Image (cartoon, grey):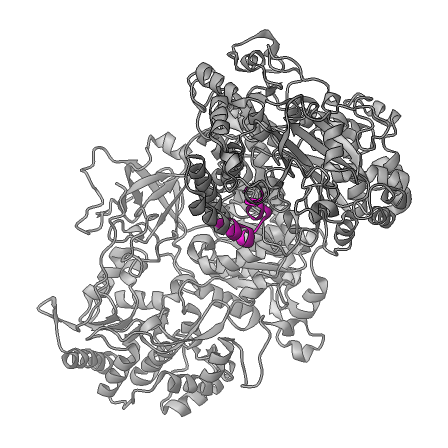
Amino acid sequence: MRSDDFSAPYDRLTRPLVREDGVLRPASWDEALERAARGFRRGVERHGPNSFGLLSCARATNEMNFMAQKFARVVVGTNNVDSCNRTCHAPSVAGLAAAFGSGGGTSSYAEIEDTDLIVIWGGNPRFAHPIFFQHVLKGVRNGARLVVVDPRRTPTAEWADRWLGLNVGTDIPLAHAIGREILDAGLANTTFIERATTGLDEYRALVDPWTLSAAEAETGVPAEAIRELAHAYARAERAQLCWTLGITEHHNATDNVRSLINLSLLTGHVGRHGSGLNPLRGQNNVQGGGDMGAIPDRLAGFQDILDARVRAPFERAWGRPIQGRKGLNLTQMFEAMEEGELKTLYVIGENPVQSEPETHKTTSRLRALDHLVVQDIFLTRTAEFADVVLPASAAWCESDGTFTNSERRVQLVRKALEPPEGARDDIEIMCDLASRLGHAWERPTAEDIWDEVRSLSPMHRGMSYTRLAELQGIQWPCYSEDTLEPSYLHSRLWSKDPEERGAPAPFGIVGHSPPVDLLDEHYPFRLTTGRRLDDYNTGVQTRGFSSPMRRGELLDLSPEDAAKLGIGDGETVRVVSRRGSVLVPASITESMRPGLVFMTFHFPDQVDTQTLTIDATDPIAGTAEYKAAAVRIERVAAEPEDAHRKDGTPAAEATTGG
Amino acid sequence: MDLRLLDEAPTIAERDAVDSFLGEPESGWDGGTRQDSHLRYARGGHAARDRRDLLLPALHAVNDRVGWISRGALNHICRRLTIPPAEAYAVASFYAMFALHERPRRVVHLCTDIACAAAGAGRLRDRLNERLGAAGSSDAGTTWHESPCLGLCERAPAALALQADAPARYAVAAPATPRALDALTESPADDDTTSGSTNGHGPRNGLTFHDRPLPGASAEPDPATAIPDAGSPDHVLLRRIGRIDPLSLDDYRAAGGYAALREALRLGPAGVIREVTDSGLVGRGGAAFPTGRKWNATAQQPVTPHYLVCNADESEPGTFKDRVLMEGDPFAVVEAMTIAGYAIGARTGYLYIRGEYPRALTHLENALVQARERGLLGPDVMGAGFAFDIEIRRGAGAYICGEETAIFGSIEGLRGEPRSKPPFPVEKGLFGRPTAVNNVETLVNVLPVLLMGGPAYAAQGTEGSTGTKLFCLSGGVRRPGLYEMPFGATLGDLVEAAGGMPEGRSIRAVLLGGAAGTFVRGDELDIPLTFEGARASGTSLGSGVVLVLDDTADLIATLVRVAAFFRDESCGQCVPCRVGTVRQEEALVRLRSGASPERELPLLREVGQAMRDASICGLGQTAWNAVESAVDRLGLFTDSTTTAPDARATTEEAR
């Protein structure tokens, strides 16, 4: 079953495609643009601007994301714009914004190297954030202790001084127990709490039931290990708390984030050099996409769209009123498609067919659209459903612009290659579409667009291209061209002066809510999903490269479960959830414990993992609970050779019910 | 660390060997049995990686028990210590005494180095070939190898047998008569005396080796027999050897032991350094660096902790002085290290001893146990509120590890490769911390320095070379052995003290300073044996080797042996040495076969100069010394008499 034959050559899209008689055929740019524009115009005329949705691209430049949200808000007149950051870190942004007023990680990479304790919670950056992890390793070599909290003993955990293997979806009980222990042991930072927080009493009452033994019973982590982490975190002079999708891909993700933030409020590990909170972002520009306003509730610079005073300068600059209400996020857009409220979708560089949970639901929803335009560099599975496919350029090497990384650093990227003959720059395509829809957008340069961002977003104002080049990137906020802010956020919270301190950070009063997909005798295994080192998300960007470490999709399970079920290493098994089933080779690994199994979604053409996952979503941020499905594992008797099918069709089977 | 471990498992004996050294594994994650409770919590990280320096002793534990290091054993060590298998393999394969393929439990190391070759090691090699098959063959119950100098030159020719067991055993045959050699190769069949502790929980009483030699082999002679004039009232460094039981701390104290430490505690660290500086003591390992300056520089480093390393990796061919000191007066080494640690502000001293010295190791291990019991090592030395202890690290057959920075790598669990200087060890040494590295003989000199006071010590010897010096006499003299002489004596005085040459023999050449040293002619016996005198004569004392080759010696064969030694011992890290030592040996082999000196000598000179100029450590820099001096000083290859056919024929016969 194992083979590295999961590579397809990269076939860049170089000709526009339009659908005719149900199939996509090549077309001229003129024809394709005209068709795309006509579909948009017709949709808006018939069903109003809010029947339109736009998915922007977290891998494209800030400039492109700014133009995309401007397209939605100005050309179409809707706030229905979002991107895949919904599927990862929208809860981090929501949680951080609720506590501190803005949604970025609070520290910088250099501070990870200069801290005393690094806690990585619900993340495997050794595999999934290898660049960030180099900074972690520098910190470790400088003497920082590393604690990893993750159900699996990941390669990251193998580097750690301590690993806590909690049950999937019990992050809040663990965090609350740590908080209770810190309070109990008298290790809370009273100066910080008094100056900068509100709601301690409610918090104290909230965590009171979570004694160490209660938490041990719920999380599976030994009480002594919880106590040890509580003391280590509270006692550290500096500490960094980092998390990734193990926190955010849950139905109560924003609550998870709040429960972690609470610990930093309790101990004062925020707003100081070396102490902070860091959601590790996945795409090169997932931070920047949100910063640019390519999200339904914020304008560029993370400004609240509900505030008329915020909207006013944008309306003046753009000559068009902006709706004073939140648009639909990605998850809501898909629900609106099902309900027939969203009729037109413009997808730029996203692949929801393979990245959204419950694939069958996603495809049927896309089929229900009146008009789907996909703009991408490859013919993705999503593009196969499109009415018009527009071949785009690859942002990271074929356009000028800026990216914003996980530490909020805006960095210039410069065009190194011409796009292949026939492909066009994203911004150019949007401008052409805008012109056809009655907005005479010249084709501005990237710097023109950036200067427009700077004129509208105070936190980007000081970042001219010249200065970005000189300083090799600048972290936001940067309010003026002659100042630089500290590398960490929220130092205001430490100020003695209440005026300067501003709004205090409230403790998040959040309760425990176990995963929605319950385990029972029919579905006794907890399936959690994640990434491996050599592949990235749905594989669109990584499949084209061969890797000696790539083994295709696998079901990781413990030696104990394998023995119990009589499964051999490499044997194909059937994994069944309440929503569907797939065939996948088993991989027996000691990093798993009984009852826990793991898959990725890197190889959707081989094994469509999203068939198994549940679309229970976080009500605040809209992120789906990819991290916790209930499954059972069945041996497959005498499967035909090569069940993963080299013809490329997914090995998903019909839903077996249950 | 995310290791890619192999699937191979250790045998019970291998696991036991490793775990009894490292302690039982904590959980399934570090090599223990996987249990449910382990699947929720794991420790590791810094604590695990910080034990990297236990890699070399862990490899020894397996090699001592099983005789070789299997992939399963290596894998288990890697899991226990969080080391990538490729790195552990790189370390294990660095050392000549470790085998990574199965071999018999008993290994005979036959010394074929200069002194032993001159004493007939060639015939012994033939005998082993006949009885056990070719070197390294596993057909018999015993395997054998040719070895570089075993440091038993006063009893040449020598052989050492090591047998894996619980505990490991050894025996020495020196001088290796055919009968003594045969006793080492007898099949190690089960016999009642091996019972020892076969359930084998590592070294009992802190001892690595069984206290009795391999059955059938005779016990080694008393260490004092290495000193022909043992008991001489003129001895300073050797004064106790032969007079006390080297295993008895009480005996040592009855003979003046630990008076120097008491004096040191009275003087305080700065006072000790002042006395050592005033004494004019310089390093005896070969580089002759002032000891007081080294200690002072280390003591003043603000970075802590400081470390002391005692370099007992005595591997320079022809050198055996440190072995005799360690075997005959081990407590003196321990006391001197304690004083050094006190002076430089170290809490831990490492004594790095070469793997070929099992008896010295045993005597030192015994000394440490007794010193700890009496509070002379440990958290409160002599009740003075000063904490100091010593860890012994055993080398495994790598000459380069005696280089003062390579020794750090070896102790740290890395390959023993020298480091570029600066930074010097006093700034960044062992584990990257300020470190003083001193040779055994240097340290032992500190005891008389403190007992007589720096200025009084400095009054001995000459102005530029104070104190006394140990000389390792071997080769053609009547009474080879270890001699202590005040600085100022000439080479002739020393040869005279050793009884001169046997009837009818004359001195063809003397190798001063070992393989890294230089040859002088038999008519240069008036060279003063002082640092400055040797320098003025274009030679050096090095480690005190005085190897006398008589008129029957085959000089060319000796040079080829020296060249082969350097080629074998080059760590391979830098190109001039790695390639140069090979080219040098090739050219000498061609010359031996009659190639034209006009063609070969310019090449040798060019290669030699490149090694001297461009190698990063002393090994490469000195690898050409002996050959150069043989050409320039002895006139080898240029003077027709030296390559006379009859001399060649004699040699061929001898081989």
Residue B204 drawn above or below residue B93: above
Q: Quadrant of residue B442?
A: top right
Of residue B205 and residue A253, the one placed in the foreground of this image is B205
Q: Is residue A216 left or right of residue A325?
A: right
Q: Name the image quarter holding the N terminus of chain A.
A: top left
Residue at the farthest top position: B192
Whether residue B474 appears in this view of the structure is yes
Q: Quadrant of residue B178?
A: top right
Of residue A527 and residue B389, the one placed in the foreground of this image is B389
Residue B31: x and y in percent read 52, 33
Residue B166 drawn above or below residue A100: above
Of residue B373 and residue B543, the one placed in the foreground of this image is B543
Residue A517: x and y in percent read 39, 49
Whether residue A322 appears in this view of the structure is no
Residue A468 drawn above or below residue A238: below
Of residue A535 and residue B332, the one placed in the foreground of this image is B332
Residue at the farthest left position: A21
Q: Residue at x 58, y 13 (%)?
A: B180
- Whether residue B620 appears in magenta in the rendering, the answer is yes
Q: Is residue A630 left or right of residue B132?
A: left
Q: Magenta stretch?
A: B607-629
Q: Name the image quarter holding the C terminus of chain A.
A: top left
Residue B392 drawn above or below residue A426: above
Q: Quadrant of residue B525?
A: top right
Dominant SS type (magenta): helix
Residue A149: x and y in percent read 52, 50
Residue A225: x and y in percent read 60, 44
- Whether residue A399 appears in magenta in the rendering, the answer is no
Q: Residue at x 88, y 48 (%)?
A: B271
